[in-house]
Image (tube, rainbow, N blue to C red):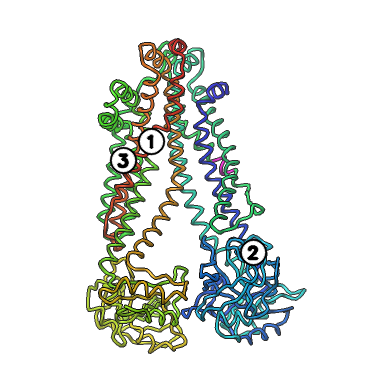
Amino acid sequence: MRNFFAHKGRMALSAVAVLLSVAFVCGTLVFTDTMNTTFDKLFAATSSDVQVSAKGASDTGETQADNGKPPVMPASVLGEVRKAEGVKSAEGTVFSTSVTVVDADKDSLSPSGGAPTIVGNWNANEARTMKISSGNAPRGPDQIMVDADTADKHHLKLGDEIGVITAVGTHRAKVSGFAEFEVTNPGAAIFYLDTKTAQKALVGDTGVYTNVNVTAASGFSDAQVKKNVTAALDSGYQIQTAKEVADANAEDVGEFMGVMKYAMLGFAGIAFLVGIFLIINTFSMLVAQRTREIGLMRAVGSSRRQVNRSVLAEALLLGVFGSVLGVGAGVGLAIGLMKLMGATGMNLSTDDLTVAWTTPVVGLLLGVVVTVLAAYLPARRAGKVSPMAALRDSGAPVDAKAGVIRALLGLVLTGAGGYGLYLASQADKASEGSMWLGGGVVLSLIGFVVIGPLLASGVVRVLSAVVLRIFGPVGRMAERNALRNPRRTGATGAALMIGLALVACLSVVGSSMVASATDQLDKTVGTDFIIQSDGGQLITPQAVQAARSAEGLKGVTEYKWTEADFTTPDGKTLKETAITAADPSYATDLNTETVAGNLKDAYRPDSMSVHEEFAKAHGISLGSKISVAFKDGSTARLTVRAITSSEVVIDQGAMYTSIDTMAKYVPTDKMPLDTLLFASAKDGQETAAYKSLKTALDDYPQYTVRDQTDYKEALKDQIGQLLNMIYGLLALAIIVAILGVVNTLALSVVERTREIGLMRAIGLSRRQLRRMIRLESVVIALFGALLGLGLGMGWGATAQQLLALEGMKVLEIPWPTITGVFLGSAFVGLFAALVPAFRAGRMNVLNAIATE
């Protein structure tokens, strides 16, 4: 206890590292638990006692049909449901999420955070969770009501015009009122029409509903009413109780939340790993500085076990202190994340803040266990200090034998990791290679950590020759200080190495993905323009006609997608297999590599193509017949005219047929809408055609027109956003690593107090002293960066070899990013040295010399 409080200043940064790591874990748990609570309350509040859904709807509600409209049921179902025993009341509802809603300037009113846009009819079930705050509910085709949150974000006022764009067309109405949520709205934008208008606007038919909401009569359970309603209706309808609907929705959200939760916990684990190095370094240096003190304790009767226990007790106190603060900081972090999500459009109320009893327990256990484990090796080293150490100068003697064993073990682990990466790069299948990649990454990382002191001796000398020698004697002293204790320098550099290795690896993978996709676009996409909806809406026939009317176009290619049951020559039936139908011009719009036949032949009547892996799996060759039972259509016997390569990026795994062939077996009213459109300009008219196409589709703001340059930029932006999010999460590990550099330098200054005093006495100025410490910090940071970036580029290059098996064959090293990170590490070193250098410069020379 006395030792801990005597050196509490030296423990501070280690405590901050524990605090940050625990805060990240607890913040993640509180944030995800709060989101689950929010959604659970919402689903429970919005679910009717029993819900009847149309055939084809998912467990969680609407599923967009191939025609772009929600699945519906005839209005007669409502009357049959009302007759069922135990039904107090029932009402028909209609809603859709396959919509785009725009203001008078054609700007989207959809949420920016990925939450859905919902348009439906105002009904009694909605009135349970929504309260009209101003204006009135929609009373005719020219009125629409908006949720108050969306109205505030987009500054909507009563009387403003809104356009609802669906597969049926565009319906325009004026804002008649605003409705406030009585439960937390996670960010959805909701718009209400009256029932008849909603039916016409969303489905194009007034005699249908998407759902029937049932209220159970007193004395009847939801399960009983469900049973009675099921008996009253023909098969083909989905009937669920409120609990079943809520559970299905919760499961759907839970899958996404689970991925988010474990991804964030993974980054918290990386921060903990980096923190371990900081704690090991802290206690190793404290033990070294107290060698004479420990020797004296041993001389007066302390046993090895008592000394060992005293160091572990200090670690326990550090772990408890840091973890308790970390739990509190974690709750604050969760609230901060909720506010951040609010800025992106997902509203989360602090009223739903959920702190489960397991959260602080997990945080405390993790923080304490990790801290005590990290302090075990320094504690064991302290226990080995002999009573004779009391007669020597401070500083623990170096165990040469242990250094040799460590070097050999590090070389073996690094070699094994390198071999694992080599095997991964030579794998024939990505699934097999990924196992070798994972093993290679782990072993090479551990190997570099173990071999760090050996690497420090060589790498620091090389870096010093380039960076430090120009600073003369001060630079040489900084080099020797960094080399004085290679084990400490190795551990400090390793903390920074881990975070930067992951940054480098992901940068290489991300750049290679963009370069590969760009290369594929250049090689395979022969069309000039791609038209699609970023919100997932299908392309209506009216929009297709508008695109065809644009001037300067050579042609427009339609591209549809649906599902069918395949019966292959080997007798197997494959349910709900994807099949793509396009115009014959698609064979030139996308130059897909074929391994047999000609892709143009796949667009002949009653013909199709399959990809190579599918053909091998089912014994298919050119001329083979496949029975294709189209969804909502009849069964066709299609002849395989082409076999395409499976090693492509664009349309990987697609199987093609012509739109005419599909139309032969699928009724006109069941034909799927287009997923994409491709357009080619006449020679020399690309710029004019681009402008004309945008103008032609001006009345269809749900679709985006891109040329190949735009498409590449969009792809780059998508991958860039994902990488930026990952870099943000890795920032915590890098911050902890910076704390490690600060702590190492601060403790090193304390350790060298007498030495600093003597150097000052013989003429070293304060400015030179501060520069020496800053240069030492810079070279340690550059050492960690060099190892991390080298290791990360190796991982990234190996990962790209596996991606090459999936068609992404271009390896691109993002040298500007790598160089920027390396140079940034030098600034990290400078920043980390500011406080230790300032404190060293302020030392009283005589007091420093007198220090024992």
Residue at numbered disc 1: 827
Q: Amino acid at mark 2?
A: Ala
Q: Could you tell me which secondary element the residue under label 1 belongs to? A: helix
Q: Kindly identify the residue that appears in the image at 62 percent across and 79 percent down.
A: 142
The answer to whether 640 appears left or right of 265 in the picture is left
Q: Residues within 10 Å of mark 3 (few under 14, many from 20)?
A: many
Give the residues in magenta. Answer: 361-365
| Position in image of residue 234 (x %, y %) | 60, 85
Q: Quadrant of residue 753?
A: top left
C-beta proximity under 8 Å, tags 1 and 2 = no
Where is mark 3, residue-wise? Answer: 413
Q: Disc count in the image?
A: 3
Which of the two labelled residues, at mark 1 and mark 2, occupies the earlier sequence position? 2
Q: Which residue is mark 2?
A: 148
Q: Is residue 374 above or below residue 345?
A: above
| Kind of residue indicated by mark 3 | Leu
* Magenta-drawn stretch contains 362: yes
Q: At x 59% / y 37%, what residue is drawn?
A: 324
Is residue 487 inside the magenta stretch? no
Please tell me which of labels 3 and 2 falls first in the chain: 2
Q: As drawn, which residue projects farthest toward the right? A: 218
